[in-house]
């Protein structure tokens, strides 16, 4: 075939160029996939990548890692990038190197996470709660608690240094990776820790560094393990806070005083390396011996006194003063104050010494017994007024108590206390002296005679009382001067219709029966009703019975007539006086007889009114026998009385 013939024949491969172009475009450039590109440009913020077909995109420089990772990328290098979009608003392809690296490394990180394999990374920045780590271009999060086995104040030596990390959490959906440096360090220290723990036993002496200080002690770094040095095991003398003796970073020598193999806890002590000052303590501080010490601490229940370095004793608040009671120890002693104390008890096993301050002074209560005795009358100033009584001065620092019940015979205790104030001078009688309890009981009312001594009332006795008050529930009467009692409405009369308090007035005198008498409690129960019922029973028993046909009025009328006759007989002995008194009394008795003897009143009405006599004739006839019977009894009783 000639050249001219070849030029005339068309080029034909049997393939459509448009289809090939579209196929190539769809295979190599697809959104959401990793494609290859070539670096064609670089500036301070971006790297420009050509992914072919005249399509370019810019990738932020930080997506290429930090430090050496960024320096490795140069113009002309071929790299893999992630195609997010073909074109943005500027007409550029949206590319990501970080996502491409994540996709490439994801399977490798998943294998490392599942198989507990470490990965290499570099700490390059600080964020809230921790740090950022570059894992071959993939950014991971390192929590602050996972940097080291102990808190690290300065992490600058760790930044920019390539080191191993353990993947703690991996979330592919959220593209989140959490790593730990502490896990690597703990793993490397585990073998060393087991070796150290195998050698530790109680009594071992170990050197360590103060790692942390708390209110209750300090944690000592012993290398792969930590031990606790309690504040009470730092020194034999009192240490209020570990910071008084120790500081973070200080090297100390300690002794293992306890080791728990199950929990791997180590208790350390520093004072155990020194000789105990409690050796032969009973010899140096014998019971009842007196020493001088310095107050080292004051609490709510007492004060600690340092007798020598490492030896302290407790002075309980009750052992501070003979007379100052109910005071806070800080009101009596102060820190650093020098005091004289007496040894009350020594416990060398528990390392305790009980001390007393008041025992070094003479007991003022002993002098009080020489000056006063029960029954003496004293005069003193009221130092304090309480709801329950008065405190009266007996000596310089000794008070006696006048209880509220011992202030007045007739007033209520709460009212009697209110009549006194602080600073008043009063007289009182000594009622009791309890030196073992350091108490003196006084009484003011005991200076006067008890009104109850003049009261002769006993249960069942009848007496006359004066009304002092009237209210809806009854009346109040005076038993004796200053002592009153209350008669209830239901006890005002035997007749229920007559149980009316309003019929009484203040100043009236009434007869009543004593139902109950409690002299100790100064309480009396009185009843007018009981008195009236007793009088009715007595009249019926003496002058007649209602069974005979006579009414109660008839019987009471006869009783009154008998009383009049007896009265007349006694008045014959004094005719001059009897004449005037009899006329007045007869008129009164007749008026009473008219009220209490309806039978007599009916007979008088019969004589005056003939019309009513016919109607009253029959009842009068019926009552006549009863009257005769009563009259016979009256005659017999008079004869006996005359005899």
Image (cartoon, grey):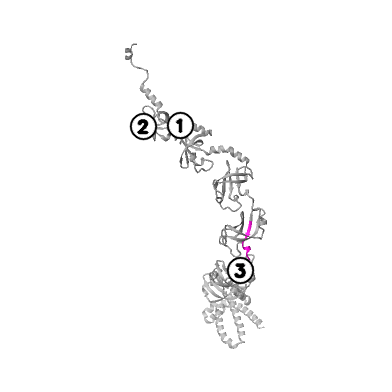
Q: Secondary structure at mark 2?
A: loop
Q: Nearer the viewer, mark 3 or mark 2?
A: 2
Real-space Cα separation, disc 1 to disc 3, in angstroms: 96 Å
Most foreground residue, 207 or 499? 207
Q: Would residue 359 be counted in the magenta stretch? A: yes
Above or below residue 574? Residue 439 is above
Instruction: Tell me which numbered mark, 3 or 2, is placed earlier along the sequence.
Output: 2
Q: Are circles 1 and 3 on residues that touch, CB within 8 Å?
A: no
Q: Secondary structure at mark 3?
A: strand
Q: Position of residue 288 (x, y in %)?
A: 66, 60
Instruction: Tell me which numbered mark, 1 or 3, is placed earlier along the sequence.
Output: 1
Q: Secondary structure at mark 1?
A: helix
Q: Say which quadrant the C terminus sits in.
A: bottom right
The segment highlighted magenta reads 353-364
Q: Nearer the viewer, mark 1 or mark 3?
A: 1
Q: Are circles 3 and 2 on residues that touch, CB within 8 Å?
A: no
Q: Tell me, for residue 441, which label it has, or none.
A: 3
**Residue 469 in view, yes or no:** yes
Residue underneath mark 2: 92
Most foreground residue, 19 or 40? 40
Residue underneath mark 1: 103
Extreme residue toward the bottom, this view? 576
Is 25 left or right of 123, judged from the image as shown?
left
């Amino acid at each position: 075939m000639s050249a001219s013939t070849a030029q005339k024949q068309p080029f034909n491969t049997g393939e459509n160029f448009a289809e090939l172009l579209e196929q190539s475009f769809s295979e190599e450039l697809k959104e959401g996939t990793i494609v290859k590109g070539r670096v064609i440009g670089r500036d301070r913020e971006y790297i420009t990548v050509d992914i072919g077909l005249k399509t370019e995109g810019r990738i932020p420089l930080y997506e290429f890692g930090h430090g050496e990772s960024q320096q490795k990328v140069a113009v002309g290098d071929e790299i893999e990038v992630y195609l997010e979009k073909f074109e943005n608003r500027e007409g550029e392809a949206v590319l990501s190197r970080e996502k491409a690296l994540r996709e490439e490394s994801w399977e490798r990180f998943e294998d490392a996470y599942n198989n507990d394999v470490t990965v290499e990374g570099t700490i390059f920045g600080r964020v809230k709660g921790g740090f950022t780590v570059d894992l071959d271009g993939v950014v991971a999060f390192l929590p602050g608690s996972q940097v080291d086995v102990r808190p690290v104040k300065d992490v600058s030596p760790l930044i920019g240094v390539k080191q191993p990390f353990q993947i703690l959490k991996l979330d592919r959906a959220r593209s989140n990776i959490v790593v730990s440096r502490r896990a690597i360090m703990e793993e490397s220290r585990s073998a060393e820790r087991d070796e150290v723990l195998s050698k530790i036993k109680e009594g071992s002496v170990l050197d360590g560094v103060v790692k942390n200080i708390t209110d209750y002690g300090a944690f000592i770094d012993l290398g792969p393990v930590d031990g606790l040095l309690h504040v009470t095991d730092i020194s034999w003398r009192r240490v209020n806070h570990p910071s008084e003796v120790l500081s973070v970073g200080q090297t100390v020598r300690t002794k293992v005083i306890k080791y728990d193999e199950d929990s791997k806890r180590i208790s350390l002590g520093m004072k155990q390396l020194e000789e105990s000052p409690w050796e032969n303590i009973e010899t140096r501080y014998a019971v009842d011996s007196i020493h001088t010490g310095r107050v080292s601490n004051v609490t709510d229940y007492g004060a600690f006194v340092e007798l020598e370095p490492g030896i302290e004793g407790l002075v309980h608040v009750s052992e501070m003063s003979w007379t100052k009671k109910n005071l806070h120890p800080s009101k009596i002693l102060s820190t650093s104050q020098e005091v004289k104390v007496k040894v009350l008890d020594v416990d060398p096993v528990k390392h305790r010494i009980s001390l007393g301050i008041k025992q070094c002074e003479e007991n003022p209560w002993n002098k009080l017994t020489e000056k006063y005795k029960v029954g003496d009358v004293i005069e003193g100033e009221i130092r304090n007024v309480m709801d329950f009584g008065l405190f009266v001065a007996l000596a310089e620092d000794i008070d006696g108590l006048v209880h509220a019940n011992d202030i007045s015979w007739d007033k209520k205790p709460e009212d009697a206390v209110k009549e006194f104030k602080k600073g008043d001078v009063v007289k009182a009688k000594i009622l009791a002296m309890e030196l073992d309890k350091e108490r003196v009981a006084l009484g003011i009312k005991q200076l006067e005679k008890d009104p109850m001594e003049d009261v002769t009332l006993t249960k069942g006795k009848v007496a006359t009382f004066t009304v002092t008050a009237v209210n809806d529930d009854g009346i109040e009467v005076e038993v004796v001067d200053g002592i009153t009692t209350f008669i209830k409405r239901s006890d005002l009369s035997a007749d229920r219709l007559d149980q009316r308090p309003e019929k009484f007035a203040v100043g009236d005198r009434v007869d009543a029966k004593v139902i109950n008498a409690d002299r100790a409690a100064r309480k009396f129960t009185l009843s007018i009703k009981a008195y009236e019922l007793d009088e009715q029973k007595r009249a019926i028993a003496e002058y007649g019975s209602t069974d005979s046909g006579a009414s109660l009025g008839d019987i009471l009328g006869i009783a009154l007539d008998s009383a009049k006759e007896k009265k007349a007989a006694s008045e014959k002995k004094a005719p001059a006086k009897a004449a005037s008194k009899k006329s007045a009394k007869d008129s009164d008795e007749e008026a009473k007889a008219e009220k209490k003897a309806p039978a007599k009143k009916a007979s008088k009405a019969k004589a005056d009114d003939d019309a009513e006599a016919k109607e009253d004739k029959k009842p009068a006839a019926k009552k006549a026998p009863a009257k005769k019977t009563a009259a016979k009894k009256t005659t017999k009783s008079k004869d006996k009385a005359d005899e």
